[in-house]
Amino acid sequence: MEHKQLISLVIPCYNEQDALPVVYRTICGVAAGMRNQDFEFIFVDDGSTDGTLELLHEYRKNSRVRYLSFSRNFGKEAAVLAGMRYAKGDYLVVMDADMQDPPSFISQMYTFLRENTDYDCVAARRTTRRGEPLLRSFCAHCFYRFINKISKTEIADGARDFRCMTRKMVDAILSLREYNRFSKGIFGWVGFKTKWLEYENVERAAGKTKWSFLKLLLYSMDGIIAFSTVPLTVASVVGLICCFLAVVLAVVFTVKTLILGDPVAGFPTLICVILLVGGVQIFSTGILGQYLAKTYLEVKHRPVYLIRETEKSKNYSTPQKGDCPVCPDQRSDQSATEENRP
């Protein structure tokens, strides 16, 4: 008899005490509606300073719930990686804790992958950004257009981290050991066949976004540096153009002075040349410095995150069937599944 498939839900959390109860009830409802599959809910507490961890302690009454808690805030990329490493599922779903990733898609994603074995991923992308500031939406569209032009890795406009992946694709992603991680690019770089589900933007269930405009700008720079060397080429090309312009201007000034007898204004010309050359040098050095900084972080081989506690490190009583009134416990089914799983 074929064993039940285990689906792992990886949910990064950073100060999500307001939204977490909503997403927990919702995924419990999704799991209850998919009775032919087993589930594990892996919450990754990314150094939250509110009551997020206390809620995870409470949810541990449900044997489906597993969690990791970082020693400090390491960022969403680290939380996604940690959850993927901790997951045991045959299929893995990454989703946010703010309900902007509709959990109702999970069943549709899983069913598609089971029925279409030539696909290894079903991902979600937003077709609209209704509710977001206009400047933020405009810059996001520009980023996707720009990175797709300069990088060989295609990233769909409006792509979310919300996706369901087969174990084969998950193992491929985990084989990438880089310290500086940009998940949207990594998902595209591994190259497995992906089905896109489109939906309109959904507002947060509660709380406020942790992504300011500056953080998003720096994050986009990380993505560009991680998946393209074109900025280095641009710096070189700009340098060559400046050299060419310098030669042309030298010829022009020589002709004007010796042949036409037109004196050249020295001070304004000198200031313009200094500013131009200095600006180009600083710009090129800055680009080189960004790549050098990323290389510096890579070669130090520091861990991407540090774990302070997990559900195994606390003295919990063994969860029993029916401990969680929202999400019926299936511990016995999961245990049998894990025994049959190679």
Image (cartoon, rainbow, N blue to C red):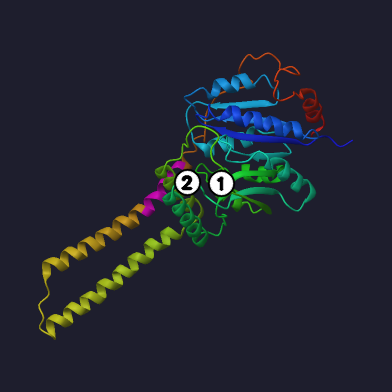
The kind of secondary structure element at disc 1 is loop
User: If the image is split into quadrants, where does the N terminus sit?
Assistant: top right
Q: Which residues lie in the magenta part?
A: 287-297
Q: Residues within 10 Å of mark 2 (few under 14, many from 20)?
A: few
How far from the left and from the top, in percent, is residue 109?
A: 71, 45
Residue 251 counted in the magenta span:
no
Q: Position of residue 284 (x, y in %)?
A: 34, 57
Residue 317 shows which numbered tag? Answer: none
Give, as a three-letter code, the residue at label 2. Answer: Glu
User: Which corner quadrant of the image does residue 170 belong to?
Assistant: top right
Marks 1 and 2: CB-CB under 8 Å?
Answer: yes
- 122 lies left or right of 281: right
Total marks drawn? Answer: 2
Query: Quick one: label 1 or label 2, which is nearer the N terminus?
Result: 2
Q: Along the line of sight, which residue is nearer the eye, 121 or 62?
A: 62
* Residue type, numbered disc 1: Asn
Instruction: Tell me which residue sits at (29%, 69%) in the image.
Output: 243
Is residue 175 visible to the viewer in this orientation of the structure?
no
- Which residue is at the front of the view, 256 or 118? 118
Q: Please tell me whether residue 288 belongs to the stretch shown in magenta.
A: yes
Task: Using residue 332 as the reference point, say whether residue 63 is left or right of it.
Answer: left
Residue 102 to residue 337: above or below: below
- Above or below, comparing residue 132 to residue 308 in the picture: below
Label 2 sits on a secondary structure element that is loop
Label 1 Cα crowd, 10 Å radius (few <14 / some 14-19 / many 20+): some
**Which residue position is annotated with label 2?**
132
User: Looking at the picture, how far across and down is residue 56, in whole percent?
Assistant: 59, 23
- Establish if 172 lies above or below 207: below
Q: CA distance from mark 1 to mark 2?
A: 9 Å
The secondary structure making up most of the magenta span is helix
Which quarter shows the C terminus? top right
Residue labelled with disc 1: 201
